[in-house]
Image (cartoon, rainbow, N blue to C red):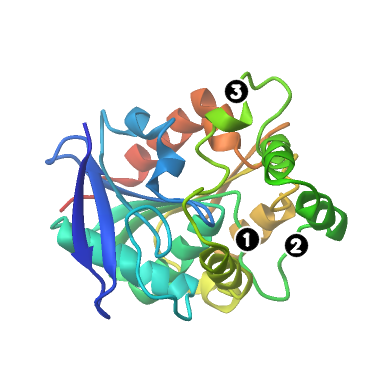
Amino acid sequence: MHEEFTAHARDGFPLAIQTGGPEDAPALLLLPGQANSHHWWDGIRTAYEDTHRTVTVDYRGTGHSRGDLGDWTTALFAEDAVAALDHAGIHIAAVFGTSMGGRVAQMLTVNHPDRVTALVLGCTSPGGEHAHERKRETRQWLAQGSREEQQAKLHELFYTPDWPGRPEDSTLLGDPTMSPREQVGHRRASDRHDAWGALPSFTAPTLVLHGTEDLMVPAENAALIAQRIPGARLRLYPGGRHGFFEEFAEQVVPDVLGFLADVGPSGS
């Protein structure tokens, strides 16, 4: 069972925060992808809650975190995540971010290294000029067609043909309550992210995960990140697409939990 609270960011923006799992367990902050709320984690969240207290926050412009549009950045979203931890009474946590959530996790580690006990980065990018961007053909193909057709294309980019779910069943394909302006705000935040120069300063134990067939965020980014962060471990999932962490959860969850157990607990 998950509880939801409302807190406020430093600038007063209302933030919806969700917690689950045992209150006395090590904390695990879960950061979703671009234009998604905490529902991004619905399919797999409970798998982490036998051993961890999970914390999520709806990004600005998603879920129940709604307010004025602003100059949103991954650094700002990271500050909101810190506000969520503070509201939950958690000082330190392991952080697992996927897609744009991985970018937010990087900025959280840059600006609040004392809050991060371990870092897991999935299907993400360091940003900046060194990153491997999505191919132009993929961008153009994805932008064409009706909303239903675009959702079907997104589904194809997230899952392999073996995945039994339908687009309408997935919680990874975007928060449907977002306005076009809110979606643009998220895209700009993600596109402007650049943590390249800071990665070598990371001291938290880091695990980098990626599906080898990811066309949304090419898998070459995983090697770049792992090479830049001292001591980082790299795990690739053959055939995995952008939603590999859900489709291949039977492999990914034990890998993440095993890593977290290996590098030590986090707590409040």
Q: Earlier in the sequence, mark 2 or mark 1?
A: 1
Residue 88 is at least partly visible in this image: yes
Quadrant in the rendering for residue 85: bottom left
- Which residue is pictured at 75% across the width and 39% down the height? 213
User: Helix or strand or loop: what does disc 1 sit on?
Assistant: loop
The answer to whether 82 is drawn above or below residue 19 in the figure is below
Q: Amino acid at mark 3?
A: Gly
Using residue 24 as the reference point, say whether residue 41 is left or right of it: right
Separation of marks 2 and 1 at Cα, in angstroms: 8 Å
Q: Please indicate whether residue 99 sits to the left or right of residue 154 in the image.
A: left
Q: Position of residue 176 (x, y in %)?
A: 51, 48
User: Within 10 angstroms of label 2, few (less than 14), some, or many (20 or more) residues?
Assistant: some
Q: Which residue is mark 2?
A: 132
Percent from the top left, x then y, of residue 162? 70, 19
Callout 3 crowding tier (Cα within 10 Å): few <14, some 14–19, many ≥20: few
Q: Where 87 falls versus 213 (above or below)?
A: below
Given this view, does label 2 or label 3 mark the residue nearer the observer?
3
Q: Secondary structure at mark 3?
A: loop
At label 2, the amino acid type is: His
Query: Which residue type carries mark 1?
Result: Ser
- Element at label 2: loop
> Of marks 1 and 3, which one's residue comes earlier in the chain?
1
Q: Residue 21: name its quadrant.
A: top left
Tell me what residue is drawn at x 35 percent, y 64 percent: 66
Q: Which mark is residue 165?
A: 3
In this view, the residue in front, 105 or 153, is 153
User: Badge 1: how crowded within 10 Å, few (<14), some, or many (20+)?
Assistant: many
- The residue lying furthest to the front in this view is 146
Whichever of callouts 2 and 3 sits on the residue coming sooner in the sequence is 2
Q: Residue 226 lies in what quarter of the image? A: bottom right
**Which residue is disc 1 drawn over?**
125
Q: Looking at the image, is mark 1 or mark 3 nearer the viewer?
A: 3
